[in-house]
Structures are given as structure tokens and as C-alpha cells.
Amino acid sequence: MQQIVSGDQAAFSELYLRYKDRMYYYFYRMLGNSADSANDFLQELFMKLIEKPESYNPEYRFSTWLYSVANNMCKNEYRRRGIRQEFQEAEALEPQIDYLSDSSIEHEQVVEKIFATLDSLGEEHRSAFLLRYREGFSIKEVAEILELPEGTVKSRLFYAKKLLAEKLEYLKDEIEF
């Protein structure tokens, strides 16, 4: 980022190549599985880096800071859309997926069912889950990104895993680890 501040194009290209796929995936999952929205937000995120590289705080890891910016962009989009950020327990416990009557489920279908179930979680639980288990951030880093206490992150992760386990119970015999 210090090189980007001084106008180094190669440094920007390196950061873009390193993070574009991860950030696209994050936006895709957080914005309703919309490829168009994910692409728009990805472009906006990297435009922010170009326009205001000095906003990066070198006291934080770059990836933690980048995901914080991305998370704030998603929050602003939810507000803009008028989407409630409060988690609706009753809604989350209702089956959100079309269960297969066939007992033989292909691997792609299992993955699809898991993602459909993940999408049915509230934004706050989904974002914590993706950052921790998809992106591999520590609890502390997830807390920094989401601007939450570590205990809240742990609680959200516990609840998300519990709901996923309950909703995906029917797949337990189909998934081989």
C-alpha cells in the first residue's frame, strides 16, 4: 500500500491479482449471489484503493483492512436496499431449500444445498461464517473486520454452525469427509 500511495502501478496490479477472486466471492455471497453486484462492488472496492490509498492504516494487516472496507460496503448496500440486518430466528429455522427425494445426491448438489442454506442465514451470521471458514481469518481478525467484540463473533459462529447442522441434517449420510 505504501508503494501504491507513491503511485506504483505494479504494486496495485499485484494487490488486485492477489485479492480479486477472494473479494469477488465475498461480495457474491454477501449480496445475494448476484454476479453483477459482485463485479460492481469489486470494481468500486479497488477504485477506493486507487482514489484514497492513504486511508489504509498500516497498523492492520492489509487483508483485514480490505475485508473491513468490503464489509462496510455491504452494510451500506443493505441499508440502501432497506434490508433488515436483524436476524430473524423463525425465518432462519424454516426450510429454505427444496429437498431432494432421491437418496443419491451428487457432490455438486450437496455443495449447492450447503450454499443455499448458508444464504438463508442472516447477513451478520453469514459474514462471520464466510470470513472465518472460507477466508480463514482468526476470530480476532473477524472481530476487527466486522467491528464487533470477539465474544459476539464466537456467538454468531456457534449459532450459524448450529443452524447449518440442523438444516443440513438430512445430508449427513451423503457427505464424506
Image: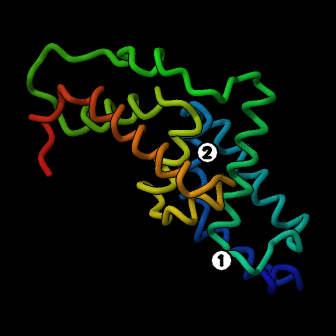
Secondary structure, mark 2, is: helix
Q: How many labels were placed on the picture?
A: 2
Q: Secondary structure at mark 1?
A: helix
Q: Position of residue 107 (x, y in %)?
A: 20, 39
Tag shown at residue 49 = none
Name the residue type under label 1.
Glu
- Amino acid at pointer 2: Phe
Residue 54, percent from left and from top: 89, 74
Q: Nearer the viewer, mark 2 or mark 1?
A: 2
10 Å crowding of disc 1: few (<14), some (14-19), many (20+):
few
Give how far across and how far down residue 155 sits, in percent.
47, 45
Say left or right for 107 vs 58.
left
Among the two numbered marks 2 and 1 on one chain, the one whose residue lies closer to the N terminus: 1
Up/down of 43 relative to 98, above or below: below
Instruction: Please name whichever residue, 158 or 5, is drawn nearer the observer in this view of the structure.
Output: 158
Residue drawn at point x = 64 percent, y = 66 percent: 64
Q: Which residue is mark 2?
A: 27
The residue lying at 86 percent from left, 71 percent from top is 53
Q: How many C-alpha atoms fall within 10 Å of the one at disc 2: few (<14), some, or many (≥20)?
A: many
- Tell me, for residue 14, which label it has, or none: 1
Distance (Cα) linking label 2 and label 1: 20 Å
Residue farthest to the front, as pictured? 151
Q: Is residue 62 left or right of residue 97?
A: right
Q: Residue at x 26, y 31 (%)?
A: 109
Q: Give the percent coordinates (x, y) of residue 94.
A: 39, 14
